Amino acid sequence: MAVDCGSETPEQCQTDNITSSHGVQVMAAVGYANAKQASFTPYTVDTGSLGVVVPIADLPTGKKANWIGPGPPGEKAYTSNGGSTFTGNYYLAPVDLQRSNGGAVETSRIMVLVLSAGQSLRYLGIGFNRENFTYEDLFQTPADNAFLHLTDSSNGADISPGYQIGAASVSLGITSSTGYNLIPLTTAGAQVPGEYDDAAGCFNFPGAPDNPGPFCGNMLFDIGIGDMYLGLDDFQRPTGYNTGGIVTLGDTVNIIGGSPSSPALCYSFSSGGSTLITPYAANWTQPPTPCGVFFNTGRVGLAAYNYMYDPTCADVGFQPLSEPLAPTNCQAP
């Protein structure tokens, strides 16, 4: 897909997409009858949410239009990016995605949230197990994931759903998982039928005087945010590692995808450091269930790995990058 890099070099684009609030963006358009007539604009890609969000001013009119709506009112709340909430109405519309060579691929008609006038968010929520059952959020199944519903002359039957994402690259359709370290997914614990539960993962604190971990549970590789969230009960947190709700500056955190004995993803950072793989902030939060473990990595892992989601084979995968963005100083227990 065509990733929005402006005039930046690939290396500059990688760094900018990791460190800037806009994250990874692809060129997309919503509601067009013919992709050749589409007006493409940057849309943020988010593996931490579900559903397409488009301003009403972006919808085409007249003979260019291929949308049905408005339908019922809707709302989308993003809890980990400052608590922003957007409102509008649901429509049925195809999503066009521009290729890097200038062509385009399109989805079948899916449900999208068209924002009321004055709101300008352009968002592609493509995460799994990200259904949100809050009031008026109707994105409730994988049917609302644009990246899984490509169509073509064979109605998409010849496309294996899924995606591979790097800091400056997005590929749709899984043709191979070669080079990726895989974490198998299970349906046990998924929020709705047809979904998978979160990937397994752990984090630990190698310098902690007590309770260093590893703390293992559910991991969300969320490229939609720059922060990290570590969900662990207060009594389990290492002494001295919590300052104002974040991991104390200078303390080391290890992130492990999969099992500690055979990690698919593994990297380390010092809280408050300046390396590319250091999140804006490593925030403490309560886990979804007492004594549970859940953590959201944020997008910084893209500094060391490409990410893959393969719903057909029930895997997520991480492809280690070569220098200069190689995973370093991993201290898996």
Image (cartoon, rainbow, N blue to C red):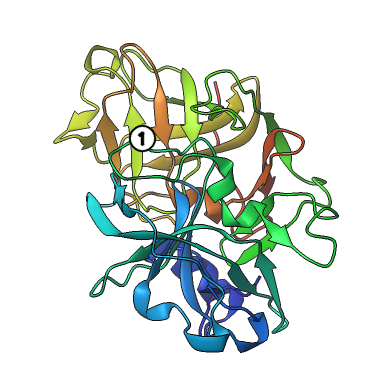
Place of residue 140 in the rendered image (x, y in percent of width and height, measured from the top left): 47, 40
- The image position of residue 107, as x and y in percent, is 65, 63
Q: Quadrant of the N terminus?
A: bottom right
Whether residue 277 is visible: no
Question: 118 or 160, which lies in front?
Answer: 118
In percent of width and height, residue 65 lies at 54, 80
Identify residue for label 1.
133
> For numbered disc 1, what is the local secondary structure?
loop
**Residue 258 higher or lower than 144, as above or below:** above
Left or right: where 133 falls relative to 39: left
Could you tell me if residue 300 is visible in this image?
A: yes
Q: Position of residue 309 (x, y in %)?
A: 65, 44
Which image quarter: residue 96?
Answer: bottom right
Q: Nearer the viewer, residue 249 or 40?
A: 40
Badge 1 crowding class, 10 Å Cα cut-off, few under 14, some 14 to 19, many 20 or more, is few
Residue 174 horizontal side relative to residue 223, left or right: right
Residue at the spot 77% in from the left edge and 35% down from the top edge: 313
Measured along the vertical axis of the image, is residue 89 above or below residue 243? below
Residue toward you, 184 or 259: 184
Question: In which quarter of the view is residue 93 placed?
Answer: bottom right
Quadrant in which the C terminus is drawn: top right
Viewer-side residue, 65 vs 295? 65
Q: Amino acid at mark 1?
A: Phe
What residue is drawn where x is 58% and y is 28%? 193
Q: Is residue 39 left or right of residue 163?
A: left
Count the marks: 1
Q: Residue at x 34, y 48 (%)?
A: 227
Instruction: Determine the image quadrant of residue 132.
Output: top left
